[in-house]
Amino acid sequence: MSSIAALNIPESYFSRTLPEEVQVVLDGIRYAHPEVKEAALISALKRWPEVLDIHISLYKFYFRSGRYAEAEWGAWKALSMAARQAGISHNYRRLHVHSTDWSTNNEPARQFLFCLKALGVIRLRRQKLADAQRVLAKLMQLDPNDEVGGGSYFQIAENLIAVLSEMDD
């Protein structure tokens, strides 16, 4: 019986194409100590500022570390980078379902949606419920079939706001 490792399946990244040097860096820090991982990601970002995967990896690192303010900042940076690469407005409030083709996997517009979802989830963690709800509502408009998976987080935001509203009454 062969093992999965023997299949030599390449690691999945967020973008369709990823420079080999970046892939080596990201692979090399996968199990690194948090301080080493953060320093390597920041260094990689300085070296390859246009690589969306590094931006995404950095905000995910901050989120997993419980550093939500930095994760939110990182998600904004990733949103801006994805918007620039997709040729759309970085202001998600101005976008609509026909702004671009949101459906193609591993393309900047699709990554924009995932970054928007991340921003909403981070804001939920930061207890910025109204802000999270607005971001996730926009995500639901741009992704009406909920392919990115923001619907459950939108419902959480809605439910928390309703509960808090009832408590205030």
Image: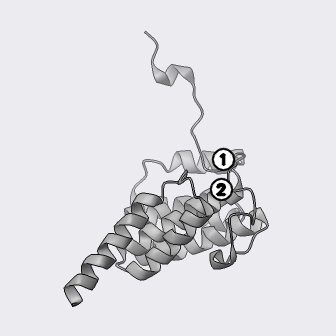
Q: What numbered label is drawn on residue 110?
A: 2
Residue 19, placed above or below residue 77: above
Q: Residue at x 39, y 56 (%)?
A: 33
**Number of callouts:** 2
Mark 2: give few (<14), some (14-19) or many (20+) Cα within 10 Å.
Answer: many
Left or right: 55, with 156 as reference point: right
- Tell me where residue 63 appears, x and y as whole percent: 42, 65
Residue 23, placed above or below residue 83: above
Q: Residue at x 50, y 51 (%)?
A: 29
Q: Earlier in the sequence, mark 2 or mark 1?
A: 1
Q: Amino acid at mark 2?
A: Arg
Residue 83 sits in which quadrant? bottom right
Residue 144 sits in which quadrant? bottom right
Q: What numbered label is drawn on residue 91?
A: none
Q: Amino acid at mark 1?
A: Asn
- Going by the picture, which residue comes out furthest to the right? 87
- Tell me where residue 139 appears, x and y as whole percent: 56, 66
Mark 1: give few (<14), some (14-19) or many (20+) Cα within 10 Å.
Answer: few
Please say if the residues under marks 2 and 1 sit with CB atoms less than 8 Å apart.
yes
- Tell me where residue 59 appears, x and y as whole percent: 50, 66
- Residue 28 visible (yes or no): yes
Tell me the quadrant of the picture where the C terminus can be found: bottom left
| Near-viewer residue (149 or 122) | 149
- Residue 36 visible (yes or no): no
Residue 15, placed above or below residue 165: above
Tell me the quadrant of the picture where the N terminus can be found: top left
- Tell me where residue 114 appears, x and y as whole percent: 56, 59
Residue under label 1, please give it. 105
| Near-viewer residue (121 or 67) | 121
